[in-house]
Amino acid sequence: MAEIVLAGVTKRYPDGTLAVERVDLTVADGEFIILVGPSGCGKSTTLNMIAGLEDISEGELRIDGTRVNERAPRDRDIAMVFQSYALYPHMTVRQNIGFPLRLARTGKAEAGRRIAEAARLLDLGELLDRKPAHLSGGQRQRVAMGRAIVRDPKAFLMDEPLSNLDAKLRVQMRTMISRLQKRLGTTTVYVTHDQTEAMTLGDRIVLMRRGVVQQIGPPQELYDHPRNLFVAGFIGSPSMNFLPARITGDHLSTVIGDVPLTAATRRALAGHDAPRDLILGLRPEAFADARLAGDRPAEAREHTFTGHVDILESLGSEKLAYIALDESGAIRSEHLAEAFQDGAGGAHVQLVAHLDPRSPVREGEDVVLTFDPSVLHLFDPDSGLNLTRTH
Amino acid sequence: MTARTVTGRAGRGAGRDERRLGWWLCAPAGLVMLLVTGWPVAYSVLLSLQRYDLRFPHRRAWIGPENYATVLTSVFWWDAVGVTALVTVVSVAIELVLGMAIALVMYRTLVARGLVRAAVLIPYGIVTVAAAYGWKYAWTPGTGWLAGFLPSGSAPLTERWPALGIIVVAEVWKTTPFMSLLLMAGLALVPEDTLKAAAMDGASAWQRFRLVVLPLMAPTISAALLFRILDAVRIFDDIYVLTNGAQRTSSVSIIAYHNLISGLNLGIGSTMSVLVFLGVAVVPLVFVKVFGASAPGQDRGR
Amino acid sequence: MGGHARARWAFLDLLVLVYALVPVLWIASLSFKDPSTVAEGTFWPTRWTWANYTGIFQNDDFVRGLLNSIGIGLISTAVAIALGTMAAYAVARLRFPGRNAVLGLSLLIAMFPQISLVTPLFQIERRLGLFNTWAGLVLPYVTFALPLTIYTLSTFFREIPWDLEKAATLDGATPFQAFRLVIVPLALPGVVTAAILAFIVCWNDFLFSISLTSSDAARTAPATISFFTGSSQFEDPTGSIAAAAVVITIPIVVFVLVFQRRIVSGLTSGAVKG
């Protein structure tokens, strides 16, 4: 178990491309940290640099206070779980799990005991004598985990370990990994491109884009106080709604009507020397069906607008209403294009509202929605910075 | 995954170390191949420009392109070129059709698939010379079971056209399995779902084969054809055993061999070597022109 | 898919079996014929005998040829595998300028007409004292086995995932341990396949053997057979040749059948995957 410190860690390829730029990060002993971002953001490169599979161009990597930049992977005492699992196909499950022990010349009895312990933790007991080819995806994943935990390393590195599993299994394995990590208390760095995994698994999230860290913090903090448009768009599913907004006096003009600015918002904007044209961000759950809004606090009912429900998705515990907006509601921003990973640049001319399942709203009908102006975010369209973020 | 592989590669200290290791690992194989082919080829060009008959070594002299003139005006040489071309075209054409039929049987059969696939490998495994003797005796009057079907008195191996026919049979029998294995591998690349979709779209079995299977297999077919053509123009063993080039059945390899070993004429032998080499080098170029295929075996964008 | 379809496939299977096996059976049957009955021209022997086999094994030339074939074949295969494995590993796993040149050269040689080498090699080897020696045949055999080896093995190396090497180093393996414990065991089937294919190439050769040898010092079995004349001028060598043909064919056919699947994948990997 160990503390991992990245100080100004940079990866520059021989051709000059900058894959990772000056990452500063301290992973506390026992912490579960998630590196997340769209593909090509540098998260895997960062993980590989921690593992020692890639050289660090600049900066320093310290494990337990010792600089390890120059150490070979095998001398870093770190275990890694690969996306492909990287199980040795010619070895049985037992030999796979025992491989690190064999290399470390662990005694037979001790190795047997530790393999049995790992197998018990991961429920692999009956599979020990099988070869990887005869295992299901989930079983292979567990063997890969077993190989990582068996030698009690200083840290676990996991590179999208669940992305080859089907959706249901992924959810099961997510909780298993979470439980295992809490139980073992081993420092873990976990790479994923899936924001749901990031939100549910980590103590803290490191959100990266184009090799640069965008924001580091607990999942809820990234959700509630995104530093910029990219973070706001990437975290949360369905994504935050973004609308063009213009400051006119003490309110905002938007396609869903005028929205009053709260005192706190005005203060925050004043401190930023904000432009008049902004991007308004509202989470889908900021909305409520006006007919059911009675149990919301008064300020949360303050503003209403009427929209036409294009599509209604009933998920049982919630309803998602998709409301078509006219073209003036369109936003094009490269920050959002990358966050949504769809290339559309956020030019969905629609608004998603997350409604209570009791809402009588129906597809193809108009609905009156309320929302709370105190939970809005305002972004600078050029820099993408969140102007309403208080800290 | 590709991005991952690339970063993985770059991560292995890319640059100099990897380059140097690559060169060191390839050097021995590369040197052997270059030395054993490059040097002789250059040497044979030199020899081809000399009068050099081992029976009359003192008459050795530089004579420029005279050997080429001798060979290129020789009826025997052009006969051999004709035989080589004819045998190549006819046997490769038969092999393609027969090989495809066998490939389909091996790939689709419902019964005894393993047995069929194993049996087809036997002709491939047989030493060419051994098989050629089998064919020779089969057609030898009196001895052969196949000769027994012919009218008495006929000796097919002593007449030009029947002999060429038997050469083609021997060649086809031995190499069709290789062709059919390649084609079967190509068949396996045609997705079952595509065939099902074509059947749903109303295509008959023949239409599925012609409109779906064949186009998807085109790269495999052209690769197999090119390999086999280049192999067929080298034909030597079968002809050597069956007729030894008698009755104007020499291929270019046979005639070059006879000039060297029986004639001990290094000058003429080398000239033929160079001409064969040039001729074979032209085949892939013509092939690409005609079939518009990229040369098979190329490292396609990997 | 009723019995009708099965019967139809069974019939087609039978045609293929007849195609593949009848010529083989003919040589085998010929080798068991009593020399006095050879001229009867029947497919099956009317009088069975082992005499042809005992005869060829008492023929020193043939035994010597067989030994030459085995010795030269094994040495050539070993050398080709050693050199080919290194080159294939580099081609499959490393990035370096000249990588495509190695592949191109291999392809070129795979298509090279052997006859074009025979004349100059004949002269070069006579000068270097390699003519009519094992080394004189090992050289061209290695050269023509190498392209096959490099192509087959590089396909195999490519199929071993990179992650396995990385995982091994993280599991605490030195680069050499990673190679020995992970890469080698996984590449072994490929090496075996390549070795068999290379051996077949060498064993099957006839042209180099009759051109670059002048006595049984290095002449391999296929060439020896072509020099069979019968023990006396009046004896027909048919039976002996048939028996010898069967003998030199058996090892290859056994190889091919035992390693059937690997050979098929090895033969086709280059052509299909390109």
Image: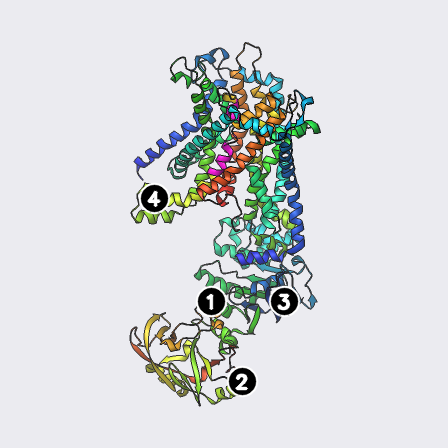
Q: Earlier in the sequence, mark 2 or mark 3?
A: 3
Asked if disc 4 and disc 2 are in contact, CB closer than 8 Å, the reply is no
Q: Which residue is mark 1?
A: A341
Q: Is residue C46 left or right of residue C83?
A: left
On whether disc 4 and disc 2 are found on a single subunit, the reply is: no
> Dot 1: few (<14), some (14–19), or many (≥20) neighbours within 10 Å?
some
Mark 4 — residue? B208
* Lateral position of residue A294 relative to residue A7, left or right: left
Helix, strand, or loop for circle 4?
helix
B238 magenta-colored: yes
Marks 2 and 3, how far apart in space?
30 Å
Element at label 3: strand
Whole-percent x, y for residue B152 in the image: 39, 13
Q: Residue at x 51, y 86 (%)?
A: A268
The reply to whether the C-beta atoms of the residues labelled 2 and 3 are less than 8 Å apart is no
Q: Amino acid at mark 1?
A: Gln
Front-most of A54 and A126? A54
- The residue that label 3 is drawn on is A10
Helix, strand or loop for the magenta stretch, by majority: helix
Q: Give the image quarter of residue B26.
A: top right
Which residue corresponds to the image point at 33% horizontal and 71% vertical from the top-left?
Answer: A311
Q: CA distance from mark 1 to mark 4?
A: 39 Å
Label 3 is placed on what type of residue?
Thr
* Above or below, A162 relative to A112: below
Chain letter of disc 3? A
Q: Which residue is mark 2?
A: A272
